[in-house]
Amino acid sequence: MSKNKSPRPEPESLGLPPCGVDSHAHLDMEDFDADREEILDRALNSGVARTGNVFLGPEAYRKNRHLFAHRPEIFFLLGIHPGDADQYSPEAVSAMRQAFQSDPRLRAVGEIGLDFYWDAHPRALQEQAFRAQLALALDLGLPPVVHCRDAFADTLRVLLAEGWSGRRLLWHCFGGDGDQAQTLLGHGWHLSIPGPASYARNEALHRAVAAAPLERLLLETDCPYLGAEPWRGKRNHPALLGFTALAVARIKNMPVDELWAATGRNACTFFGLEALP
């Protein structure tokens, strides 16, 4: 006789207070065209008070920012992803500069960095785009949000060469081990923890999160990707952030409400957002 699987719990059932922040989401992607408003409402109903939408390049920002005109809980990030390094040009960076100077909802330059896993574009071009956007962030006085995949040593080399040690910086979607975490934390940077922290076999990540100071941690969905258990493999969205919070709270042996509030405060401070109640 086959056993019926228990239904997955819905995020609203977690009863988290309205002080969580999803630091990294891609809500302007077509994955959400059919139900974006419902998804945004569910986030609020699940305790996610703020969400950072990441626009992948100035054209995406120009075309899609209107989607959130009536959603004050959404703040913006803007950067040319290393997988789109062929879109980099001085003109593109100039367009980004104009956007940041005219739109106070833009709070960080990102996601930017190096990706040697897909290696979609020459590494030299990726690094050129990365350095140019780091210079933009420094000039604007805004933090970068860094994407790094299979490129830890080179990403670190570029960041140190560009003078980012000791400056405000967020390592997006951290999935490394304890040594990598301590290296990043040693430069004064923050780590954003995604859904894979909930995966049982991610023991190195669990140890890294356990050892990291709470005041340096943020949470993210990176939706529509990287859903946390028990929603792994399904379309991710900000309301599901609570399941990442549950996993991180277990790792750090603390109440989930406290973890939720602390990471929300961290995000507000990092991005310069108004403090949540």
Image (cartoon, grey):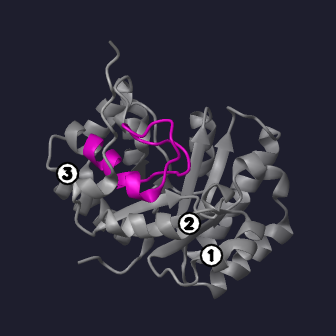
Q: Is residue 246 magenta?
A: yes
Residue at 50% of width from left, 36% of height from top?
A: 233
Q: Which residue is mark 3?
A: 256
Residue at 40% of width from left, 64% of height from top?
A: 43
Identified by mark 1, the residue type is Leu
Q: Main secondary structure of the magenta part?
A: loop
Query: Considering only order in the chain, which callout, 3 or 2, is on the residue closer to the N terminus?
Result: 2
Give the x, y percent position of residue 61: 70, 71
Who is closer to the viewer here, 68 or 22? Answer: 68
Badge nearest the viewer, 1 or 2: 2
Q: Is residue 222 above or below residue 78?
A: above
Which residue in the rendered view is the most extreme toward the front?
Answer: 1
Quadrant location of the C terminus? bottom left
Give the x, y percent position of residue 95: 78, 75
Quadrant location of the N terminus? top left
Identified by mark 2, the residue type is Arg
Q: Is residue 14 above or below residue 38?
A: above
Badge nearest the viewer, 2 or 3: 2
Q: CA distance from mark 3 to mark 1?
A: 32 Å
Q: CA distance from mark 1 to mark 2?
A: 9 Å
Residues marked 1 and 2 touching at CB (< 8 Å): yes
Give the x, y percent position of residue 197: 37, 37
Q: Which residue is mark 1?
A: 67
Who is closer to the viewer here, 126 or 161? Answer: 126
| Residue 176: mark | none
| Residue 36: mark | 2
Q: CA distance from mark 2 to mark 3?
A: 27 Å
Magenta stretch?
Answer: 218-247
Q: Label 2: few (<14), some or many (≥20) within 10 Å?
A: some
Q: Label 1: few (<14), some or many (≥20) within 10 Å?
A: few
Q: Is residue 183 visible?
A: no
